[in-house]
Amino acid sequence: MPIIECVPNISEGRRTDVVDAIVAAVAGTPGLTVLDRSSDAAHNRSVLTLAGDAESLARAIPTLFERAIPLIDLRSHRGEHPRLGAVDVVPFVPIEGVSMTECVELARRVGQDVAERLNLPVFLYEEAATHEGRRNLEDIRRGEFEGLASKMALPEWAPDFGPAQPHPTAGASVIGARMPLIAYNINLATDRLDIAKKIAAAVRFSSGGLRYVKAMGVALDDRGIVQVSMNLTNHEKTPIHRVFETVKREAERYGVAILESEIVGLVPSAALTAAARWYLQLDRFDPDQVLEERLRIK
Amino acid sequence: MPIIECVPNISEGRRTDVVDAIVAAVAGTPGLTVLDRSSDAAHNRSVLTLAGDAESLARAIPTLFERAIPLIDLRSHRGEHPRLGAVDVVPFVPIEGVSMTECVELARRVGQDVAERLNLPVFLYEEAATHEGRRNLEDIRRGEFEGLASKMALPEWAPDFGPAQPHPTAGASVIGARMPLIAYNINLATDRLDIAKKIAAAVRFSSGGLRYVKAMGVALDDRGIVQVSMNLTNHEKTPIHRVFETVKREAERYGVAILESEIVGLVPSAALTAAARWYLQLDRFDPDQVLEERLRIK
């Protein structure tokens, strides 16, 4: 059974009954599991984590839109987090037994379906983007709901699906496909923030480091130590063990040891199995040798 | 959903129709999966790998005995592998979400049930053993089917369940609970068998090494290298990474590098996750953070 994760970000984080109603609209879908939901009142935003196969998600996500859009009016929505739609962002994430290509196809199919059913402009992003300038969510979302009508008047901001003008209350939605994000932190046995910042700069893509790493140095004041705080945006191409070993080597150069590392939130099993294989030099290992994997296949 | 593995060893490896019939007797049990079956004609023995929860196994295993015992007559059975019963050995192995204590209880419950239904002597072994002298399968099986009647005449070899004499055609069965076995080999970048043997002696329990390791040095003549070939009998207490690092350190002492390691057959996911956690220093990791694990719980 293939597993796709889907993480709808919804512009409502205060009215619990509204979020309840939206979750309830998808919770009963056969083949779909609601793994997590979290709401942030300051951001006025909720994030759902769903998992299922392509068919269950293709059925559930349009239902989620149909339930959410009448309940959320962006004309009166205020919150700290940038947003351009009532259902702001919907990424599909390949977890197991499914390719990125299949997630891209699913994003496009759902995007088209949602645009037609709700008369809503849809922009495709990241791996599903139709041109390079729409890969980054931040570029699409810049100007937010309030600036959307004038932005969409520009020919380069015609949506991928749906009408050429914003939906009056729901704005537009950004739908796409991306690799799972792994929030990964490494704690250093020092209180010197400058060292954590230097290591972050060495390891992150934006300043010349590893391609799928975002990193910053932060102080953990209560513990008197510092941390290299990272997002790993493609664990297949930039695996956890390479990030760990790179940080460890940079820290050694400053005479600093690694205290521990931590994963915040969920991690796909394959990311940990890959680390075990690398360290143990398990060259001829087939994922079917994992007993639980064999059980899933049978 | 808890997962218990059960590995019945059956004294028939030549008549495919008999093995088919025995597999068919359990294959349809709700909640149970037949992961693997393999028959060896020289040994005249078949090994089934089943997985399921306690209830499905408690239902399936007595059915397996009822089907197998009328079809196998040990009085005419010949094969290279030692055996004392038609259904020779049945270990229950905790894989996930289940304790060793629960597997011991299951072994005793199934042992009693089988003894009563089939009027068959049952010996409990390994973690389910009722006294220390019955932990080792080899001690129980010594003398085999042919010597069983005289062995059972001794008071110390009264069975745990069932009659005090062997079953006329099916002998007796050994039922118990043990940790999963991991067949783990490390290949060395040398053709010197003496080094592989020295490392095997250093790492194995029997000559002073790690408690849950059996090891021997073997030559892989076709590749011109040698191997430390091991069985890890308790990966929770003697984890794979400790075995790997110990072999690596011993090899270094002889100026030899590790080429690669390999796992033969199945490995529980937890054994690989533990290695990833150790190498990455993931001190505060909860198994529920593995996305697939979260899916199973929900």
Image: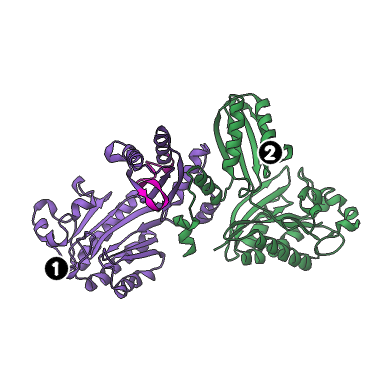
Chain colours: A purple, B green
**Whether residue A232 is visible:** no
| Quarter where residue A33 is shown | bottom left
Image check: A156 left or right of B109?
left
Residue at 15% over, 69% down: A75
Residue for badge 1: A168
What amino acid does circle 2 point to?
A: Gly
User: Residue B274's spot in the image, x, y percent?
Assistant: 54, 48
Is residue A246 covered in magenta? no
Comparing A59 with B111, the one in front is B111
Residue at 70% over, 50% down: B15
Image check: B42 left or right of A46?
right
What amino acid does circle 1 point to?
A: Pro
Q: Mark 1 lies on which chain?
A: A
Query: Mark 2: few, some, or many residues within 10 Å (few <14, many ≥20)?
Result: some
Mark 1 or 2: in front is 2
**Whether residue B57 is visible:** yes
User: Residue A295's spot in the image, x, y percent?
Assistant: 53, 55
Q: Distance between the residues labelled 1 and 2?
A: 73 Å
Comparing A119 with A246, the one in front is A246
Is residue A223 covered in magenta? yes
Image check: A45 left or right of B51?
left
Q: What element carries label 1?
A: loop
Residue at 27% over, 60% down: A110
| Residue found at the very far bottom of the displayed protein | A17
Quadrant occupied by the N terminus of chain A: bottom left
The magenta span reads A219-241
Residue for badge 2: B209
User: Residue A183's spot in the image, x, y percent?
Assistant: 37, 51
